[in-house]
């Protein structure tokens, strides 16, 4: 069976004439790009809307704040005081119960800490807010070291800060510090020197000291409880001097009778002054012991 081929072998597939009006052909003329404008015009309506939103935000924030500071649930209803000293704890509790700290959010801890540090016997405090209504106070008391005798008896710590005042010492727990010179001249340094000297002693030996007087920055005059003898010693060797005195006072009393004072400040010799001198020995006021 024969098939008729209607296409001639030498016939071109495409016409040599241009296809006018075809959509997929680009024009010979370059088309210009159109730039889209990004500039936006802010009108008065936009400004009023933005101002209204900002106003509503701050009014709402102020309302929330006012509600928080006036809310009864955020009032400080419990104060927890922790201290090693019962007296300091009671002092702080009494003060805070009278002051009524108020709302826990507006309570100024820095100001309250400054006020509490001024209370007698308080060295430092740490404050903490525990939401919704608890204020925690951790108080560090001042540790007593001496009674200062100046018109009355003032219990002080190692910094010379007064903890309490008494007309008479309530007990013999702490030595009585007396100054031979001007009290307020170098007062903190004097208190520090005496506390440093007492810190060298064992508690049992320190408890026996009744009065201590600062002669100069290196010399102390000490009297033990129940003994009228004045002991002069150096600050650096106070423990050694007092131990030697306690081991020797009985033998000195047997040799020379009651002793008025003992000077232990020299390394190689000791000076004693008997309390009752005989008439024939009145010119020899002191006795030297090697």
Image (tube, rainbow, N blue to C red):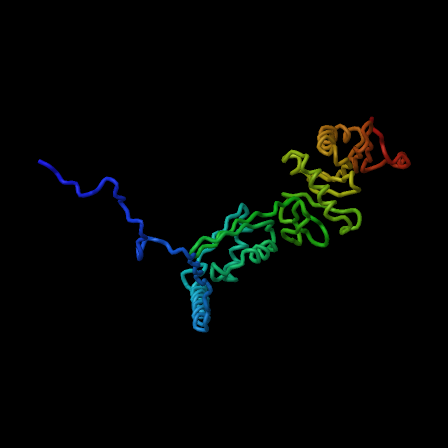
Picture quarter containing residue 59? bottom left
- Identify which residue, 15 or 216, lies in the foreground: 15
138 lies above or below 235: below
- 51 to the left or right of 209: left
> Where in the figure is residue 76, as x and y percent of width and height?
45, 59
Quarter the N terminus occupies:
top left
> Where in the figure is residue 209, as x and y percent of width and height?
69, 39
For the view shown, which residue lies furthest in the left direction?
A: 1
Quarter the C terminus occupies:
top right
Picture quarter containing residue 66? bottom left
> Where in the figure is residue 55, as x and y percent of width and height?
45, 69
Total labels drawn: 0
> Which residue is located at x 80 percent, y 42 percent?
216
> Which residue is located at x 16 percent, y 40 percent?
5
> Which residue is located at x 82 percent, y 35 percent?
273
17 lies above or below 254: below
> Where in the figure is residue 142, as x and y percent of width and height?
61, 47
- Identify which residue, 233 or 276, lies in the foreground: 233
- Identify which residue, 171 or 14, lies in the foreground: 14
> Which residue is located at x 81 percent, y 35 percent?
274
- 269 to the left or right of 283: left
């Amino acid at each position: 069976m024969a098939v008729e081929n209607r296409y001639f072998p030498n016939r071109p597939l495409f016409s040599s004439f241009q296809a006018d009006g075809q959509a997929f052909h680009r024009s010979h003329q370059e088309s210009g790009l159109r730039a889209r404008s990004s500039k936006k015009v802010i009108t008065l309506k936009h400004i009023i809307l933005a101002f209204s939103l900002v106003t509503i935000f701050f009014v709402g924030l102020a309302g929330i704040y006012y509600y928080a500071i006036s809310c009864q649930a955020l009032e400080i209803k419990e104060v927890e005081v922790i201290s090693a000293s019962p007296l300091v704890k009671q002092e702080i509790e009494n003060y805070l119960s009278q002051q009524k700290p108020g709302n826990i959010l507006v309570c100024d801890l820095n100001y309250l800490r400054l006020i509490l540090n001024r209370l007698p016997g308080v060295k430092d405090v740490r404050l903490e807010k525990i939401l919704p209504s608890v204020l925690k106070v951790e108080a560090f008391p001042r540790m007593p070291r001496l009674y200062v005798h100046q018109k009355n008896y003032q219990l002080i710590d190692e910094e010379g800060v007064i903890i309490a005042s008494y007309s008479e010492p309530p007990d013999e727990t702490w030595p009585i510090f007396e100054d031979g010179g001007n009290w307020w001249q170098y007062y903190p340094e004097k208190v520090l020197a005496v506390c440093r000297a007492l810190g060298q002693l064992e508690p049992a030996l320190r408890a026996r000291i009744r009065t201590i007087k600062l002669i100069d920055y290196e010399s102390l005059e000490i009297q033990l409880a129940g003994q009228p003898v004045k002991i002069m010693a150096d600050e650096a060797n106070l423990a050694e001097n007092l131990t030697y005195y306690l081991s020797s006072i009985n033998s000195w009393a047997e040799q020379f009778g009651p002793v008025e004072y003992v000077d232990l400040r020299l390394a190689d010799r000791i000076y004693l002054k008997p309390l009752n001198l005989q008439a024939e020995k009145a010119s020899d006021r002191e006795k030297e012991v090697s």
